[in-house]
Every structure is written in structure tokens, then in C-alpha cells.
């Protein structure tokens, strides 16, 4: 809020001081990271390793933090072994095949009246029981595979990865610290995405209908020099009535990371001309 108010103050001053020529006036702006996230653990645990320090670069998917997970790894190994067990299925298949063969022989003998109908029914029931046992063994193996997948998911919760390419702003916890679950708890690492960057600028309402999405502006970071081309991505449709301004967001590519976030800047739009001001008529 303070930063937005600061920008609005400078924008008003820049608008009043705009030249009457055709050249566009520069507007005060602020360069910010595209997003900032605080990396917290979704589970409670003891921190085993923190792989990054303040100022380090991080790639999307890179491991940032590992929690102590020996119990979870043992659970994964146990679940994996159980999911690969085939003894019950093999035994059930053998019983089913034997019962099927036995039923076939019994049918032939029953046609020749060598066995009673009761014996035939008993063999048929035996085959159905063997078939049910085989189905049960297969279902238990599928359930074991699901348990293995669940154990792997629980283990993965203890490894925290970077959600995007960015830089580490701060590291608040270290190996040996206990991390807890919840948004109110202390984060482990704070990460900022600086490619692309967000350029926030507040303009007088006179420029509202002159701006369009996709329009470009030349951004000059304060104290660094050099101009960088940014593209308009957001044009607010709710104005600030008190100051007579509206907000605009531009996207600034920053592949090499040469432009830092959290810095003041000026932006010029070549397509914008200062609003014409009527001079007082001579008396």
C-alpha cells in the first residue's frame, strides 16, 4: 500500500510537469518480482538438509529442502515389496486350473453316468471357490500397489522443490530446526521469481483510453541506467477517485537476471502523448 501511494504521488507530479510537445512524458514506476512465495513444509518434521543460501538461483523442480524421512523410506520399501509379491496369485491360479481340469473330467464322466450329479455339483462349487480366491489375490495385489503409491506420496511431501525459476530472497530455518505445518508458522525459504518482472505504474485517467493491452513501454531502472522494453499486460478498470488515477501492469522479460526486483524506475510510452492543456485566452 505504501509503495502504491508513493507511486501515485510521483505520477501526479510527473503529469503536471509533462511537456506540451509531442514527446511522451516518463512516469514513475516500480519494478517487482513476478511472484514471491514462502516455502513451508506441508508436514511436521526435522529439517535434514537445506540446499540453498540467500542469493542462490533455483531452477523449477530443484530440491530446496529435505526433511528427515527414514521412517517414510522404510514404509515405501515395505509397501513396494508387498506390491510385488506374487505367491498368493500363483497358488490361486494353480488351484483354479486344477479345479477347471477336474470339472472337465467330471462332466465327461457324468455324461457316461460314471459319477453322481452331487459329485459334479461339488466339483463345480470347488472351481467357483478357486476362481474367487484368484480374484481376491489379484485385488489384494492392486491394493498393495495403491498402498505403495500412497507411501511414495507421503515420502515426497518431505522433499520441498522450487515451484519456478527464481532466486532465494532469504533462508529462515536450518538443518536441525523443527518445521511445523500451517500458514502461520515460520517459512523455511523465501523465493522470488524475477523472470519475468512486474512493472507497476499509476497513470492519470486522461491516458486510460490511449492504452491498450500489448502496448510496449521503455523502462529505465533507477540508478542502473539502460532501457528495457516491457509489455502492457493489465489495465485496471477500477479507478482511484481520490487521486484520479488507474493502475497498469507491464511484463518485463529478464532472462539473464540483470534487472533486480524491488527497484524504482521510469517508464515511457512512445504511443502516448501528453494531454493537451488549454492556455488561458488573453483578455
Image (cartoon, rainbow, N blue to C red):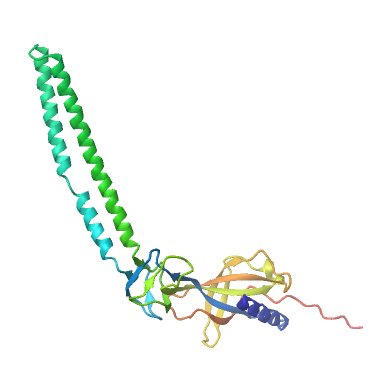
* Quarter in which the N terminus is drawn: bottom right
Left or right: 141 with respect to 255?
Answer: left
Which residue is located at x 14 percent, y 18 percent?
A: 120
Q: Give percent across and percent down for residue 150.
A: 31, 54
Could one spot residue 275 in this view of the protein?
yes
* Quarter in which the C terminus is drawn: bottom right
Q: Considering depth in this image, is 269 or 48 the residue closer to the camera?
A: 48
Q: Considering depth in this image, is 39 or 48 the residue closer to the camera?
A: 48
Q: Answer with the quarter of the image where residue 20 lies.
A: bottom right
Q: Answer with the quarter of the image where residue 44 lies.
A: bottom left
Q: Answer with the quarter of the image where residue 67 lies.
A: bottom left
Q: Give percent across and percent down for residue 277.
A: 78, 78
Residue farthest along the top direction in this orientation: 113
Which residue is located at x 13 percent, y 38 percent?
A: 91
Left or right: 1 with respect to 39?
Answer: right
Residue farthest along the bottom direction in this orientation: 223
Amino acid at each position: 500500500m505504501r509503495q502504491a501511494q508513493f507511486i501515485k504521488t510521483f505520477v501526479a507530479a510527473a503529469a503536471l510537469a509533462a511537456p506540451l510537445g509531442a514527446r511522451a512524458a516518463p512516469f514513475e514506476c516500480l519494478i517487482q518480482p513476478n511472484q514471491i512465495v514462502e516455502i513451508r513444509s506441508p508436514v511436521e518434521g526435522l529439517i535434514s538438509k537445506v540446499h540453498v543460501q540467500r542469493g542462490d538461483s533455483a531452477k523449477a523442480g530443484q530440491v530446496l529442502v529435505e526433511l528427515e524421512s527414514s521412517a517414510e523410506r522404510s514404509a515405501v520399501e515395505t509397501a513396494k515389496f508387498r506390491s510385488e509379491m506374487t505367491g498368493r496369485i500363483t497358488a490361486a491360479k494353480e488351484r483354479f486350473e486344477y479345479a477347471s481340469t477336474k470339472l472337465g473330467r467330471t462332466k465327461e464322466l457324468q455324461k457316461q453316468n460314471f459319477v453322481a450329479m452331487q459329485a459334479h455339483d461339488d466339483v463345480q462349487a470347488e472351481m467357483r471357490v478357486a476362481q474367487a480366491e484368484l480374484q481376491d489375490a489379484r485385488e489384494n495385489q492392486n491394493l498393495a500397489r495403491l498402498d505403495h503409491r500412497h507411501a511414495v506420496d507421503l515420502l515426497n511431501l518431505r522433499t520441498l522443490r522450487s515451484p519456478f525459476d527464481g532466486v532465494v530472497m532469504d533462508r529462515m530455518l536450518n538443518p536441525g530446526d523443527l518445521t511445523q505445518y500451517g500458514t502461520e508458522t515460520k517459512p523455511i525459504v523465501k523465493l522470488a521469481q524475477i523472470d519475468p518482472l512486474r512493472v507497476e505504474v499509476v497513470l492519470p485517467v486522461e491516458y486510460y483510453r490511449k492504452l491498450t493491452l500489448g502496448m510496449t513501454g521503455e523502462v529505465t531502472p533507477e540508478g542502473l541506467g539502460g532501457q528495457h522494453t516491457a509489455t502492457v499486460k493489465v489495465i485496471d478498470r477500477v479507478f482511484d477517485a481520490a487521486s484520479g488515477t488507474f493502475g497498469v501492469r507491464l511484463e518485463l522479460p529478464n532472462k539473464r537476471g540483470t534487472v533486480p526486483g524491488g527497484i524504482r524506475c521510469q517508464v515511457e510510452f512512445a504511443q502516448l502523448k501528453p494531454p493537451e492543456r488549454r492556455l488561458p485566452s488573453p483578455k
